[in-house]
Amino acid sequence: MNIPITILIRYDEIGLKGRNRRFFESCLLSNIKLALAGVEPMHFHMPHGRILIDTDLSCAEECTSRLSRVPAVASFSVGRKVEADFDVMAAVGREMIEPHMVPGKELKFCVRAQRSDKLFPHTSPEINFEVGSRIMHDLSPRGLTVDLKNAKFILEIEVGMKGIYIFDNRKAGIRGLPVGCSGNVLCLLSGGIDSPVAAYMMMRRGCRVHAIFFDNRTFLGRGGYDKVVKLGGILNRFQMGMKLFIVPFQDIQVAIRDNCKDKNRVVLYRRMMYRIAQAVAERNKCLGLVTGESVGQVASQTLENLAAVNNVVRMTVLRPLIGMDKQEIIGNAMRIGTYETSIQPQPDCCSIFMPQRPATRSRITDLEADEMAYPMETLGMQAIENMEVIEMGSLAVRECAGSSGPRPMSSPDL
Ligand code: ATP
Ligand code: MG
């Protein structure tokens, strides 16, 4: 049997956007439509300050699981349109509450009615009382109690001009801004714990995040590649449309290892990553680079070394984790679902490519001298020419119609 439902989506930060609000709202609406693509039936409307979706009860679970990953959604709830009859309202409310009750455990609840249809013959407190007492009559023997301040389940009733709706307990969204409204960025995604969290944090600030991975498959095998593709897929569920650039990096790492001072190696690798990332970012209309760096985490991330790395690019480098400690980052990785993949064992490059004692205070003139000792530009160009591009989501497929699968790119400005 079809049971029509309405999903109410609330957003908060967009509401503060003044005259640009329309732009942010339409960005969010198209992201929601994209996230719910394929779920039928679906009808969207957008009364002032929120989004409503009419669909069927059979789609509720799928919709709510997808909405919980859409940045800018502050909260959402599933509602049913009901007759103006307190017995019917209470019956629907009871159906919504019952699945949340655990035998032998108390559940604190309250009813919150809002009445914009002033012709409705009862005030909001009267509606609360009439519906609440009917539900209590049925469910208090099983542990339901009323608590107006600390309710764990809030049944919301809206009495409006277009009818009466009862809404289930609110589910939290991930808040932030709609992906796309801040522009594109390119994240250096390494397969570790940090960079996926950094990518996610920028998505929540309205950026569409593309990713670039520097792959040393010759020496380290396919493990890193497989991990990054998997991480890209997990991250893309928050935004759709990610492009993942895989850059062969082994020749560059070998050249640096064999021609430059040992202590400078890590910063030199990173400077090449930044240069190549900037070239790829500019060709793909990205406005900034994103990394998972955090001050002092490892030798390459002292303030001196961060400055030495930054020195080779003109593009803004965004480091959303810069002041976070590892435990905070791990907590976030667990929440967004990347942690389990990030900790999968990966071959260790330390013995082959890492110096015994990396410099913690590299000097730029010293690094530049090292960079004269290997064919930096030629190797950089070759790496980009042999780059693989993976389109991770539906948006990108539409943007670059006809270009599915790996696609080489050529001659960047390094
Ligand atoms: P993560 O920081 O993602 O956990 P990691 O610890 O292996 O991975 P770090 O040595 O901390 O990486 O490097 C700092 C940052 O440099 C990473 O967060 C990432 O943004 C970038 N980076 C390092 N290695 C790579 C790589 N092979 N490909 C792409 N980006 C990389
Ligand atoms: Mg790290």
Image (cartoon, rainbow, N blue to C red):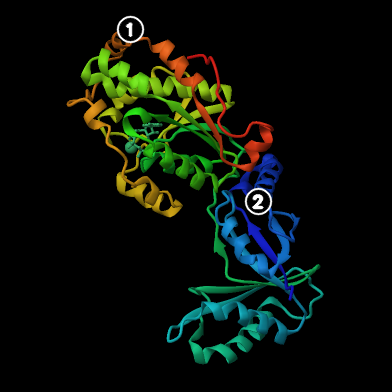
**Residue at the (55%, 64%) spot, across then down:** 171
Say which label, 2 or 1, has the lower sequence index.
2
Q: Which of 339 and 321 is in front in this view?
A: 339
Name the foreground residue: 103 vs 85. Answer: 103
Q: Name the residue under label 2.
A: 32
Whether residue 154 is situated above or below residue 137 in the rendered picture: above
**Quadrant housing the N terminus:** bottom right
Residue 317 picture quarter: top left
**Residue 360 position in % (x across, y down):** 23, 25
Q: Which residue is drawn at 72% across and 84% down?
A: 88
Drawn side of residue 165 relative to residue 344, left or right: right
Q: Percent x, y for residue 91?
A: 67, 84
Which dot, 2 or 1, sits closer to the camera?
1
Q: Quadrant of ligand 2?
A: top left
Instruction: Indicate the position of residue 369 as horizontal and vertical percent values.
Output: 29, 8
At horizontal 35% and vertical 39% (from top left) the residue drawn is 323
Disc 1 within 8 angstroms of ligand 1 (CB): no
User: Disc 2 residue type?
Assistant: Ile
| Alpha carbon separation for disc pair 2 and 1 | 50 Å
Which residue carries the number 1 mark?
A: 372
Front residue of 47/243: it is 243
Q: Nearer the viewer, residue 121 or 37?
A: 37
The kind of residue tagged 1 is Met
Query: Could you tell me which residue is drawn at 39 percent across and 18 percent down?
Result: 311
